[in-house]
Amino acid sequence: MVVLEFSMFPFDKGDSVSPYVARILQIVESSGLDYHFHAMGTILEGDYDQVMGVIGRCFQALAADCNRVECSLALDYRKDRRNRLQGKVESVEQKLGHKLK
């Protein structure tokens, strides 16, 4: 199972890129994968081919009308675990003894 964090946006569309981020989030939502959107990016969980397929569809959606697209991603693969999107957070919270924001 893969946990993948990514940020993708156009470089050539001015200061506010939220319409393009919204376009990407529609793709993420329609994928059916577990995800978490935050101020600086999105985290996905699924099989490698699933999450990379989402990344590819997001890129194609922006490349259709953007001349320059920035993308950064970090991938964590662990063969023996599922539901790590929340499990990783819960593990740290347990060690701290309280919930995090």
Image (spheres, helix red, strand yellow):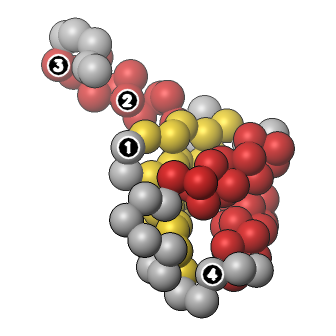
Q: Position of residue 11 (x, y in %)?
A: 45, 79
Which residue in the protein does label 3 denote? 96
Distance (Cα) linking label 2 and label 4: 35 Å
Q: Are marks 2 and 1 in contact (CB under 8 Å)?
A: no
* Mark closer to the chain start, 1 or 3: 1
As shown in the figure, which amino acid type bears the numbered disc 4?
A: Cys
Q: Earlier in the sequence, mark 4 or mark 1?
A: 1
N-term-proximal mark, 2 vs 1: 1
Q: Marks 2 and 3, Cα distance to the nearest angstrom?
A: 11 Å
Asked whether residue 47 is in view, the answer is no
Q: Earlier in the sequence, mark 2 or mark 4?
A: 4
First of labels 4, 3 by sequence position = 4
- Judged from this view, the residue extending furthest toward the front is 14
86 on left or right of 40: right
Q: Nearer the viewer, residue 67 or 14?
A: 14
What residue is disc 4 on? 66
Residue topped by disc 1: 39
| Amino acid at the residue labelled 2 | Val
Tell me if 84 is positioned left or right of 101 in this view.
right
Q: Answer whether residue 41 is visible to the viewer in this image.
A: yes
Calculate the distance from the C-alpha at mark 4 to the C-alpha at mark 1. 22 Å
